[in-house]
Structures are given as structure tokens and as C-alpha cells.
Amino acid sequence: MKFAIEPAPVPVLPVAGTNEWFPVHRIYCVGRNYAEHAREMGHNPDKEPPFFFQKNPDNLVLDGVFPYPPLSRDVQFEVELVVALQSGGAGIAPDRALSHVYGYAIALDMTRRDLQGAAKKLGRPWDVGKAFEKSAPASPLRRAAEIGHPSSGAIWLDVNGQRRQSGNLADMIWDVPNQIAILSTLFDLRAGDLILTGTPAGVGPIVAGDRMHGHIDGVGDLEVTVV
């Protein structure tokens, strides 16, 4: 096959404890999947079905450095559990969903909140607020074969040593099997897909020089510096 231009590199995540790399196909994100976060954003979690948006695979950041993006004065953090799929399909049943999971990681769904808010008011997509360059700092993947499938455990984020977000994976409105099942009715899921599973309450702004430290019990830690 002859390409008209040089093809872009395949986005990847490192696999912890190995010399292997996990190729990333798509990044799906579930919105407002913790009740307290839904409420802090002005929504009633009891009245909303799950909804999804996407980031671009090349939005991933592996070096622990987040450059403050242009055109925004309100960039906010959202710490999330990442689910990495080793296989996919359509119409996946919840009781079979975890068999498609390769592993787990931590990511920050960095958000240009002012641009997202403007898009919401105009009824436009969120891409400019969510899918900008380097908007998805992430940790190495931990294999499910090693750590199992975490369904409970602390998830938190500190900024400059101060706790800003705190929750438990068990607080998800839609758990991981149901997220996979629902997504598979909307898209043909594939090996290499990532799912960012939502964030607990406490999201807030960052500025250059801030140091963010995210943690999920059983999965690990992610440290990111804003430059």
C-alpha cells in the first residue's frame, strides 16, 4: 500500500510491568456518571440516561506534562478510571462485558470549561472544550489479568497537595459493564477502544505551575504538571 502522505503514528499507552504498548483506536467518555458531579454541574442524575462524547486518540499525554491550552481562561481537571478493551462488537450483554476488558488506567479529562459552556448554550458539540491537544493525560495500563476488575475503591485528585476530588468507583451511576453494553448499542466497539468512565464531584480550574496527583485504589497514580 502506497500512502499519499506519511501516516500518523498509532497512539499508544504503555502496559505497566511489560515492554508492550497498547494501541488506541478510539476514546469514549461518559458524561456526568457520578451523582454529586452531575449535581454540581446543575443536573438531576435521577432523570438522565447515560450519554457519551469522544476525545481523539492523539489527545493522550504520556509524559506527565499538560500545556495550558489557548483560547481558554477556565481549564478544569476531571480524574477518571480508564477502561481499555481487548475486543469489541455490537450489542454486548452486561454479563459478558468484562470479558472484553484488557486493563485499566487513570486519566484526566482536561476540559476548557468556558468553551464547553459556550457550546452548550448554543446547542453545539463539545469538541472544542473536550478534544483539544493534550487533553487526556494518562497513566500506564494495568492488566485486568493482574489486578482484576475494580468496581469499588477510592478515586481522588490532589492539586498542589490539597484534596480537590474524592469519591469511590462504587458511586458510578452506570458501572463499567453497563457502560460497555450501552456504548455497544451506539457504536461497533473494537479492540483498542478506551472508555473514560466519569469523574466524581469537585472539578475545578488549574493554572500554570499547578501539580496534579490522581489516584485510584488498585490501579495506581498519575502525576501531571501544568506548564
Image: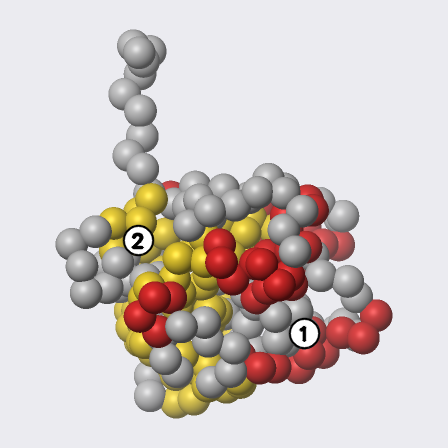
Question: Which residue is at 34% across, 66% downward?
Answer: 145
In the rendered structure, the answer to whether residue 39 lies left or right of residue 222 reads right
Q: Quadrant of residue 36?
A: bottom right
Examine the rendering and report whether any part of residue 214 can be seen: no
Taking depth in this image into account, of 49 and 224 the one nearest to the observer is 49
Amino acid under disc 2: Leu
Question: Which residue is at 81% across, 75% downward?
Answer: 46
Residue 89, how many percent across, how many down? 57, 42
Q: Residues within 10 Å of mark 1 (few under 14, many from 20)?
A: some
In the rendered structure, the answer to whether residue 115 lies left or right of residue 190 reads right
Q: Earlier in the sequence, mark 1 or mark 2?
A: 2
Label number found at residue 125: none
Question: Which residue is at 39% across, 83% downward?
Answer: 217
Which residue is labeled 2 in the image?
13
- The reply to whether dot 1 and dot 2 touch (C-beta < 8 Å) is no
The quarter of the image holding the C terminus is bottom left
Q: Is 176 located above or below residue 202 in the figure?
A: above
Q: Residue furthest bottom?
A: 162
Which residue is labeled 1 in the image?
173
